[in-house]
Amino acid sequence: MNINPNIHPKKPNHSLPDSVYDTRVSALEITSEESQADNSPGFAPISPETPSWGPPSSGNDTDPGFAPISPETPSWGPPSSGNDTDPGFAPISPETPSWGPPSSGSSSSGIPSVIIVPGQPIFPSMSTDRTANIRFLHAAPNQPAVNIRLGNRTVINNLQFGSSTPYYLDTANQRILITVTNSRTGAVLYRGSFSFASRTAYTISIGENTSGISLYMLTDMPCNRTNYGCLRAVNLSPNSGSVDIFLSGYGRVFQSVNQFSYTGYRLISQGTYRASVSESLPCTNDNLITMTTDYVECNNTRIAIMDTSALTVMNGVTYTLYIIGLAYQSPSLKILPLESDLIY
């Protein structure tokens, strides 16, 4: 898609590779302002290096390097038919292709630090052309419970980390002030203005960086598929590094999702799945990955699965897997699935 040339992305305070600021994004906007919090969140160190695990030097389980495989490795990979022409088949490749609604979707992309308004979807069920749907997610692990004001009204009090709100209707096509305060002390943690397009839905996540909190605005696109659900992932963990995401029956569906970045959409057949997240594996061939309920392994490297969550997919519904929390610290990293069907 074409990005407005007058809007230039700029990096946040913490250093990330230039590739994180890929302007191919089509659905996610972020604004970051200096926090007005009365204290600074603690810095979350990068997760420890994953130890290398090689195959046992012999078949003897008394060898020092032996790591038993238990429980039995579950079945992963393509849908049960094994036929790539099956309607439920979603191809898997090192760079996950973009599927679903965005016309210019891509694989894992960086988040720019200014608002970029993409082409907007149409939600026929909305009652007026001058309203937008807005919901909030608390994804800042080192921040307290918050109150949120949307314009001149309080929409939620005491929103806890890991919790989300329903969608709220508000006037579109004008600047709306969002204020986030500490629920206990009343201190202002964030205040900034956003523009919302009419007949469009947004999820605004309360995240954090080294100087305080930031608000990450993601456009929730309708799926518009009658025989599939649409799935994407967003990594909002401040210390996870890049992660891989797996889905039972599909294997690795998203590879190397960097901090504060998101993926394109994939088509997923209707059903109930197990979604898992780990640090990124050092391999590009998905067929070489061995998985259990506790770890994933390839190229003689074994990495612990950090969280698993149940995901029920329905046809025609958009789902986002939010990666929140802290890797190897508390509150621990987890997958939080959110669906967007209530807006259609």
Image (cartoon, rainbow, N blue to C red):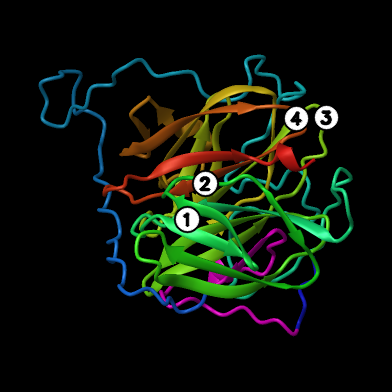
Among numbered discs 2 and 4, the one appearing first in the sequence: 4
Among numbered discs 1 and 2, the one appearing first in the sequence: 1
Q: As displayed, is residue 174 above or below residue 184?
A: below
Q: Give residue 315's quadrant in the image.
A: top right
| Residue 73 in the image, given as x and y percentages of width and height | 39, 19
Among numbered discs 1 and 3, the one appearing first in the sequence: 3
User: Which disc, if any, is residue 226?
Assistant: 3
Quarter that holds the C terminus: top right
Q: In the image shown, does 166 or 118 lie closer to the viewer?
A: 166
Q: Amino acid at mark 4?
A: Tyr
Q: Which residue is mark 4?
A: 228
* Element type at mark 3: loop
How many neighbours does mark 2 have within 10 angstroms: few (below 14), some (14-19), or many (20 or more)?
A: many
Disc 3 versus disc 4: distance between alpha carbons? 6 Å
Quarter that holds the N terminus: bottom right
Q: Is residue 177 magenta?
A: no
Q: Which residue is mark 1?
A: 236
Asked whether the beta carbons under mark 1 and mark 2 sit within 8 Å of each other, the answer is: yes
Q: Which residues are magenta?
A: 6-31
Q: Amino acid at mark 2?
A: Tyr
Q: In the image shown, does 208 or 22 lie closer to the viewer?
A: 208
**Residue located 62% across and 15% down the image:** 80
Among numbered discs 2 and 3, the one appearing first in the sequence: 3
How many neighbours does mark 4 have within 10 angstroms: few (below 14), some (14-19), or many (20 or more)?
A: many
